[in-house]
Image: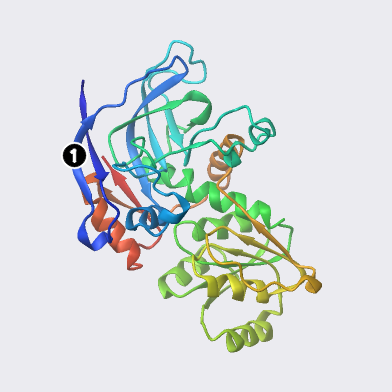
Amino acid sequence: MEKMRAMVLSKCAAIETNPLALTMIDRHEITRPNEILLKIEACGVCHSQLHGIEGDWQDLGIPPTLPTVPGHEVVGKVVQIGDKVTKFKIGDRAGITPLLEACRECQYCKEGKENLCESSTITGESFKGGYTEFITVAEDFATKVPNEMKPEYAAPLFCAGITAFKAVKAAEPKTHKKIGIFGIGGVGHMAVQFAKVENCEVIAFSRSQSHLDVAKRLGAIDAIHFSEDQQSFLEALKEKHGMLDAAIVFAPADIVTDTAIKAVKKGGLIVIATIGERPSFVAFEEKTIRGTLIGSTKDMEQVIKTCEKEKIEVISETFPLEKANEVLKKLKNSQIEARGVLIP
């Protein structure tokens, strides 16, 4: 059995203790006729992986098994294909989202919402993760990546990109609609651009000045420091811009979600793309609160097309695979401008 390098998590622990260990594991091999084998070119480092590694989400069953290889936004080259594969040929480039596979038989799969499948397999929550050199995937759950897209550009599209794209769509964007984006990191900086493509007026909120600068540069009409002093924050916002038509929340903090709901006008829409407590909600204000989770394979194809056509910018910083612990530490301490990407 051939081996490959992988950053393996054997026990959930604080990232400061370097819980990921460089290990030689068996190289994945095609076991079904509809699978392709990818030689990984890049894997984005997502904030949700940090929660999984540190054990914050064990009550949600994440990670479901240990040891595991994290990493769920993967781009690579097809180096081998199963006998029945028709979508890819050797030498093509492909990417995988956190949705490694779905059952294809439940009501969600039949409605084209396979990202909601209850018996789906999640990339990076088993030994099939991206912090390694090779991965196999059923062809239906891989998306073609144009040859001219750099790996460090393409990889973040497969979680951050699709999450941002789908969240903006969920906010029902229209020309001149005023959308507040709370949290401008790896996901938020792309959401600013997707909302701009729809001619929305984007106001960005973040605790970090460098993230606010990025949002302004990418076309936000304003970028405002987020403050936990909710009353004065909301009063200042109202005075400057009035109430928001819609808000999208990427920052995983309950105070942010609560503030976003209160910043939106009556009858407005709040899209929550993070995990947290349910904030206070007044039914008589006729607001809609909507959750969103990555997207379908069709959505992913749309993301690639939109990024190509609209020249969406992806801010990324590359690191060697072995530096996974260090990258996650930087992410925890807000020292990554947008997206860290591991190159095996």
* Rendered image quadrant of residue 281: bottom right
Residue drawn at x 60%, y 36% as measured from the top left: 114
Q: Position of residue 229 (x, y in %)?
A: 54, 86
Q: Is residue 311 visible?
A: no
* Residue with the mark numbered 1: 23
What amino acid is labelled 1 in the image? Thr
Q: Is residue 158 left or right of residue 12?
A: right
Q: Position of residue 213 (x, y in %)?
A: 46, 71
Viewer-side residue, 84 vs 169: 84
Task: Judge whether 27 appears above or below 86 on screen.
Answer: below
Quadrant containing the C terminus is: top left
Viewer-side residue, 177 vs 9: 9
Of all residues, the one furthest to the top in this rendering is 83
Quadrant containing the N terminus is: top left
For the rendered model, the colour scheme is rainbow
* Rendered image quadrant of residue 75: top left
Element at badge 1? strand
- How many circles with numbers are drawn on the protein? 1
Viewer-side residue, 120 vs 123: 120
Q: Residues within 10 Å of mark 1 (few under 14, many from 20)?
A: some
Q: Is residue 152 left or right of residue 98?
A: left
Q: Is residue 5 visible?
A: yes
Residue drawn at x 30%, y 57% as measured from the top left: 328
Q: Position of residue 120 (x, y in %)?
A: 52, 36
Q: Is residue 271 left or right of residue 19?
A: right
Residue drawn at x 60%, y 67% as measured from the top left: 278
* Rendered image quadrant of residue 172: bottom right
Q: Position of residue 36 (x, y in %)?
A: 41, 22
